[in-house]
Image: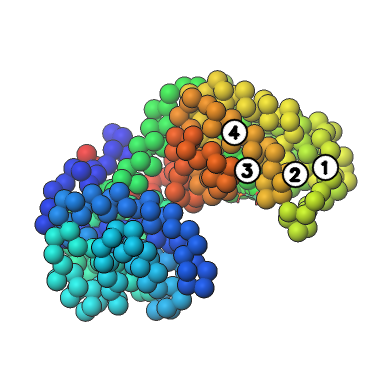
Amino acid sequence: MNKYNKKTIEDIEVGGKRVLVRCDFNVPLKDGVITSDKRIVEALPTIKYLMGKGAKVILCSHMGKPKGTVNMKYTLAPVAEKLTELLGKKVELCKDICGEDAKAKAAAMKDGDVILLENTRFDPREEKCDPEFSKELASLADIFVNDAFGAAHRAHASTAGVADYIPAVCGYLIQKEIGVMGKALADPTRPFVAILGGAKVADKLNVIDNLLGKVDTLIIGGGMAFTFLAAKGYGVGKSLLDETKIDYCRDMMDKAEKKGVKLLLPVDTAVAAGFPDPIDAPIDVKYVDSDKIPADMEGLDIGPKSAEMFGDAVKNAKTVVWNGPMGVFENPTLAKGTIAVAKALAESDAVTIVGGGDSAAACEQLGFADKITHISTGGGASLEFLEGKDLPGISCLMDK
Ligand code: AMP
């Protein structure tokens, strides 16, 4: 059975019902003002569908890390205001999560109305996935809709616990995440190429292991590549190196060979005397072959030959998954490798998937976002997805 084949809002009768929708409204704020409303805008299709069907829509989300106490620095009031503006209909914010005010407001709703509960993390029971709290949340509604992919790797009351008490389905955002990424992992159109980058190899051990069982080509760039280069016996100078993971990288190279997976590492590297400080300060770099990194220099980006080689692999692929920058992309001189990879994905006809975080931001800043098949809305969640883990916020939903 495909574990990603979950019922959606279109598979359940929602008209006239109270529907609790878990969104990811954890938006960036500066002095109480929302600096990017992207996450709210992305939640609108699900909300509008439910409104259009005459559901009573009860929205909930976490914001920041108030750690189980009521801290109005993290109130969802700015989100309620923004939703009111975007929906053209008053979205009232409840004073509590599932207390007297939320109960009264939920009871007074008419079909098509929308309310927002206060920050779910104001209650210490949320992050513990406390059954009583989950039951209280569930008692507000007849149906649970999870549309917060960014929080789906957390087993919290509002992301998974409520599904123990009322029927649970996914909204459009999660439907797309599991449709595109789930298909790529379960039944990819081949050749399937994965590109991993970022700082530390230790953060992606399980991703590498899982992907080696699925892809035709695995490309490794960024800071994590140096531990692989060291495992090949190359000197890496002052580059990021995790000596405790050299044996692991050697095992992964053996596994790749046994499975017939092509493992591509950088063949050239941008090196400098040291890490830029501040990170975007002008920096002198030279390009050297990756087996000739001088002992007193640090590798900070892939070089042009690697960028071309990685680009060629993308050109021939039918499915591409990318997670993590190829270098210190925060610095324009060291962003070239990351830009080259983003461009290769944008120009490709393959199904292209970018897994959250820095690589997603790079695609958006470069204006390539609309040329990518799917940019995941969750950094941590998409990594766990690539690790092959079950995400509690998804496995709790009803199967089709
Ligand atoms: P991650 O959070 O693991 O996705 O890593 C992202 C960070 O890795 C970015 O802040 C990059 O600056 C950093 N990074 C990428 N390549 C290198 C490198 N060669 N040396 C040091 N840091 C790097």
Residue 400 against residue 379 in the figure, above or below: above
Looking at the picture, the colour scheme in use is: rainbow
Dot label at residue 343: 4
* Closer mark to the observer between disc 1 and disc 4: 4
Query: Picture quarter containing residue 374?
Result: top left
Q: How far apart are marks 1 and 3 (CA)?
A: 18 Å
What's the residue type where badge 3 is placed? Pro
Name which of mark 2 and mark 1 comes first in the sequence: 1
Give coordinates of residue 43: x percent, y percent.
Answer: 34, 53
Secondary structure of the residue carrying tag 1 is: loop
Mark 4 is surrounded, within 10 Å at the Cα level, by few (under 14), some (14 to 19) or many (20 or more) other residues, namely some
Element class at badge 3: loop
On the image, the x and y values in percent for residue 196 come to: 59, 38
Quarter holding the C terminus is top left
- The numbered mark, 4 or 3, whose residue comes first in the sequence reads 3
Q: Which residue is drawn at 41% across and 37% down?
A: 181
Query: Are dots 2 and 1 in contact, CB under 8 Å?
Result: yes
Secondary structure found at label 2? helix
- Separation (CA) of disc 4 from disc 3: 13 Å
Disc ID at residue 325: 3
The mark that comes first in sequence, 1 or 3, is 1
The location of residue 307, given as percent across then percent down, is: 68, 30
Q: Can you say whether 174 is above or below 288 in the image?
A: below
Q: How far apart are marks 1 and 4 (CA)?
A: 22 Å
Tell me the distance, in whole angstroms, between the alpha carbons under discs 4 and 2: 16 Å
- The residue at which mark 1 appears reads as 285
Q: Say which residue label 2 marks.
A: 333
Q: How crowded is mark 3: few (under 14 residues within 10 Å), some or many (20 or more)?
A: many
Question: Horizontal and vertical percent for residue 93?
Answer: 30, 72
